[in-house]
Amino acid sequence: MKTGLNKSQKTTEILFDEASRWITVNTYNTDLKKRLTAYSVKHPDLCRLTDDTEDGGLSFEVAKGRFCFRLTEPYSDERRAAAGKFAKKQNNCLRNRKV
């Protein structure tokens, strides 16, 4: 969709305060919009579409406790090597599998 906005203007904002039971999510991110839309259809009591900005952005309200931030530690060299070894093993198994 052509919106007339450049990438730096297509932001995702997550707003909440301690008093409200709702988190407001304003986003242009296609994947996040799809996920929040599907969640709002499945759980209308926990998530709802509140605004369509007509330029590609959507706003949702999500109940606190249903939306999370996940911070991940960077992989150590050992973990990265182990993950690479595992992926190569899985790839070899898939190549040798008969259909």
Image (cartoon, grey):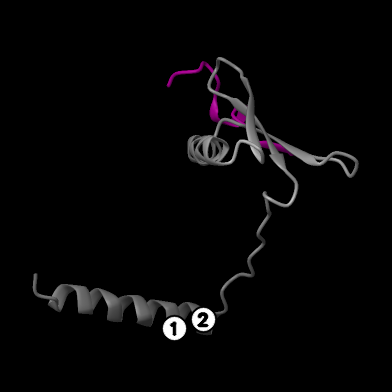
**Residue under the point 49% across and 35% down:** 30
Return the x and y of residue 15 as percentages of the image width and height. 77, 37
Image disc number at residue 79: 2
Query: Which residue is at the front of the view, 28 or 77?
Result: 28
Q: Residue furthest left?
A: 99
Residue 15: tell me if it is visible.
Answer: no
Residue 5, magenta (yes or no):
yes
Return the x and y of residue 4 as percentages of the image width and height. 52, 16
Residue 30: tell me if it is visible.
Answer: yes
Q: Quadrant of the C terminus?
A: bottom left
82 lies left or right of 46:
left
Q: Is residue 81 above or below residue 34?
A: below
Instruction: Considering the whole magenta stretch, tell me its main secondary structure.
Output: loop
C-beta proximity under 8 Å, tags 1 and 2: yes
Q: Is residue 66 above or below residue 38?
A: below
**Residue under the point 80% across and 40% down:** 16
Q: CA distance from mark 1 to mark 2?
A: 5 Å
Query: Which residue is at the front of the view, 11 or 43?
Result: 43
Query: Which residue is at the front of the view, 87 or 54?
Result: 54
Q: Is residue 93 above or below residue 38?
A: below
The quadrant in which residue 13 appears is top right
Amino acid type for the residue under numbered disc 2: Arg
**Residues packed near mark 2 inside 10 Å, few (<14), some (14 to 19) or many (20 plus):** few
**Residues packed near mark 1 inside 10 Å, few (<14), some (14 to 19) or many (20 plus):** few
Badge 2 marks a residue whose secondary structure is helix
Image disc number at residue 28: none
Q: Residue furthest right?
A: 19
10 lies left or right of 97:
right
The range drawn in magenta is 1-15
Return the x and y of residue 40 as percentages of the image width and height. 57, 36
Amino acid type for the residue under numbered disc 1: Ala
Residue where numbered disc 1 is placed: 82
